Structures are given as structure tokens and as C-alpha cells.
Amino acid sequence: MTKILIIGGGTAGITVAAQLIRKLKKVHIELFEPSKYHYYQPLYTLVGAGTDKKEKTIKETSKLIPKGVIWNQQKILGFKPKENIVIGEDCKEYVYDYLIVAPGIQLNWHLVKGLTETMGKNGVCSVYGYQESEETFSSLKAFKGGNALFTSPNTPVKCGGAPQKIMYLTEAYLRKKGLRNTTNVIFASGGSKLFSVPGYTEALQKIIDNRKIKTHFSHNLIKVDGQKKEATFTVKMFEGDQQVGMEEKIISFDLLHVAPPQSAPDIITESELAIQDGKLKGWLNVDHYTLQHNSFPNVFGLGDVCGLPTGKTGAAIRKQVPVVVNNVQRLLERKEVNGKFKYNGYSACPILTDYKHVLMAEFEYGYKPKSSFFFDTTKPRWSMYLLKHFYLPWYYWNRMLKGRN
Ligand SMILES: Cc1cc2nc3c(=O)[nH]c(=O)nc-3n(C[C@H](O)[C@H](O)[C@H](O)COP(=O)(O)OP(=O)(O)OC[C@H]3O[C@@H](n4cnc5c(N)ncnc54)[C@H](O)[C@@H]3O)c2cc1C
């Protein structure tokens, strides 16, 4: 019987398992996932802002594994793609005919000196975690004014809009609590701009200007001193467009929200499956359109781990999964992978601009705007807020993870 192994039971792993088992007959599908729990991460921002309890984002993995799929509850520690083998935590070798790699992204908290020691204390918080998202709201409630500093790293991140979402929500919260006049809201990003998609960038800039939020770009957080309430950044210095050096800069804070540096998981970066050089070095080396591995044709990639020049989101995965399912099916039928039914880089980022509005940014490769709606989505809307807060979580648990569109 054909053996399909899936690495990772997050958004991508469960969704692809559910679609494969619906479509394919007489296949052995085995999913490797160590975690007892599965998380709906897009709600973390609203947990951080206090509208939802963290328990709303979690379900037991056992309840989500599609019927007919075998759950192997362990981590994969290595790959031997030339031999069609993955190595489990149990030191056993598992042979496959097809492999789908979806272990997500790695949060590198340790790369910011002092961060793990102070996370959840001294006003330092993050919505990039289940426990941490709840602690974010505690930090917010304890804040009494001063510098509210929000950082974004110089690496790719999952949901590139999340560091801004929690900032806009916090700003709205502070206005409601009468603390805005005594607070400086500051956005310090390792990137070079606010957002990469034309139209949405200008709309977000308008919000930044109207709400008097200070922005600093090319500021990469490297150290946090929770006791002294100081955040240290390396800052690129420019003369015109030319970078002429780097300097360290300290910004003091009373509230610090951190989006940690992120990378592909070490098991990928250290393997033959990774891109070996260039800007996307270390990420999974898949074709941008077919999601087939560029060196090993029986390997496919899905989700945050992939070296794709687009936003890393669950919305992207919704469009990626049918492409991989179709291509695996074609290979099983001894056909070529389909160059026509392809992934076009679609991703979406519903940016919460306050407790009632969402700016729904949708785009494709080249960061080209691609709206699914007939109205202007560069305008923050209540309808998009309802979609984000209520419809999308329902859709995720009841449709997407069950392999339905
Ligand atoms: C704060 C925040 C807000 C977000 N907002 C949005 C949003 O509004 N809209 C949106 O579309 N997306 C959003 N996202 C992004 C979205 O959650 C991710 O893009 C998506 O979950 C990625 O799915 P994935 O399957 O690639 O990874 P994950 O869902 O993270 O799953 C990876 C799985 O792989 C497992 N794994 C890891 N290593 C191994 C191994 N060695 N062996 C076996 N298994 C392994 C892990 O345990 C995990 O279960 C947000 C994310 C965050 C953090």
C-alpha cells in the first residue's frame, strides 16, 4: 500500500491529512505530531487584547486527527530523503512513498538576550504563544502609562501583521482607559517598511499618523533588560539608500510587546531539504507554484516552513493544500505534477485596527493586492471584524480541519 507520511499536525498537517483521506483510496496516511494539543493561533491577538480566553484557541489533537489517518505521537528528528526515510524520536526509521513536510516555524526567543527570563514579567509580553497571549492582557491591564513599545524582528514571521494588530488594539484600549495622553506608542521594526502590499501600506500609515504612533525601521531587537526596562536594538545607519554602518540603541519601555525572531525549524535548516543559499536559505526548498520539493520529487511542503516569497498564514495554507493534494494524486496516477492548478502565493492578513474594525489585506506573489470582496478592503470594516472574530474560527474547526472548503 502507498505510504504517505505527514510531518506536523498543525494547520497544514491536519488540513492536508483530512483532504487526502477524503480523496485517496487504499493509502496508508501517517501523521507525526508530538503535541497533545492543537492551537488556533489567529485568535492569540484577541486573547492578548482581552476579548477572548486562551482556552478558546485550543483543542485536543486526538479529536482532530481525521478518521483513517494514523497519528504517530512523536517528533521527527531527521530526514534521509535519498532513501525515502524519516527518523523518529524513538530512533526508528520510517520509510515513505510520499512525504509532506509541515512542521511550522521556529520561534527563536533565545536570540534576544534576556527575553525568556523576563517574558510575562516587568511589562514584557507577546501574543506569539498560548500562555504568553493571556499574559499579554495581564501586562496591558497593569500598564499605567509611559512608553508602550512594540517590536517586529528582521526575520520572516508568521502573520506579519500580528505585531501591528496587538499595537492598534492596545492603543484603542489605552484610549478607552484614559491612558492615551500619558503614553507614547512606539513601533520598532527590523524591517524597512510598515507593510509590503501597496494600498494597504498607505492605509496603515494613515492609521499610524492619525493615532500619533511613532515608528522606527531597521531597528532589530537584540536584548531586553526587564529590571531596567530597557530594550536594545541594532540599528542600520544609512546615507541615502546606502547602508554605512550599524549602531546599538536603547529604548526604555513600560510595556514591551515582542514578536520573536523566527526561522525554519532546525531539523529543516540542518537537512538536505533546505534551500542552501540566498535570501531564503534554511527554509524548505519547494517550487513556488507546485509546492513540490525542488530536489526530491516525492516530497512536498506546506505552511510556514516553506521558502516562499509570501505571507506565512493559515489563509495561505487554505490555498496551498488543494494544490499538494492534487499533485500527490497525479503522481499516484503516474501523471506529471500539474503546472496549471497552481498556488499563486495567496495569503491574507486580517489586521485588527481596534476592537471593532479589521483591514482585510489579501495578496499574491509579488505582494500584489488580491481582494476576494467587492468593496474597498483598504478601509477598516466592522464586517471584516465579524469575519475575523467569529466566522473564521468556526470555519477553521468545522470546515478547514475536516478537509472541507
Ligand atoms: C499571533 C498570531 C496571529 C496570527 N494571525 C493569523 C491570522 O489572522 N490569519 C491567518 O491566516 N494566520 C494567522 N496566523 C498564522 C497561522 O497561525 C500560521 O501561519 C499557521 O498556523 C501555520 O500552520 P503550520 O501548519 O505551518 O504550522 P503550525 O500550525 O504551527 O503547526 C506546526 C506543527 O508541527 C509540529 N512539529 C514541529 N516540529 C515537528 C517535528 N520535528 N516533528 C513532528 N511535528 C513537528 C508542531 O508541534 C505543530 O503542531 C497567526 C499566527 C500568530 C502566532
Image (tube, rainbow, N blue to C red):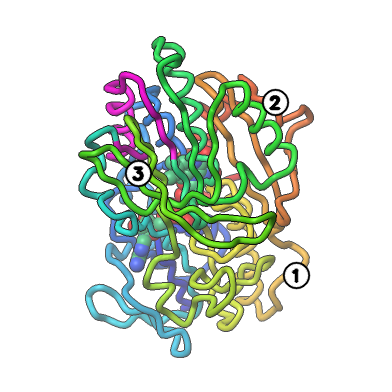
Label 2 residue SS:
loop
User: Relative to 229, is 375 above or below?
Assistant: above
Q: Which circle marks residue 231 in the picture?
A: 3
Q: Residue at x 53, y 56 (%)?
A: 236
Q: Of 69 and 100, which appears nearest the observer? A: 100
Label 1 residue SS:
loop
User: Relative to 39, is 134 above or below?
Assistant: above
Q: Of 54 and 259, which appears nearest the observer? A: 259
Q: Residue at x 25, y 51 (%)?
A: 114
Q: Which residue is mark 2?
A: 379
Other residues around mark 3 within 10 Å, as few (<14) / some (14–19) / many (≥20): many
Q: Earlier in the sequence, mark 1 or mark 3?
A: 3
Residue 32: which quarter of the image? Answer: bottom left
> Left or right: 81 with respect to 132?
right
The quadrant the C terminus occupies is: top right
Span of residues in magenta: 124-150
Picture coordinates of residue 112, whole percent (x, y):
33, 54
Q: Residue at x 75, y 43 (%)?
A: 370
Q: Earlier in the sequence, mark 3 or mark 2?
A: 3
The extreme bottom residue here reads 83
Picture coordinates of residue 365, whole percent (x, y):
71, 56
Q: Which residue is mark 1?
A: 339
Q: Marks 1 and 2: in contact by CB < 8 Å?
A: no
The three-letter code of the residue at mark 1 reads: Gly
Residue 227: which quarter of the image? Answer: top left
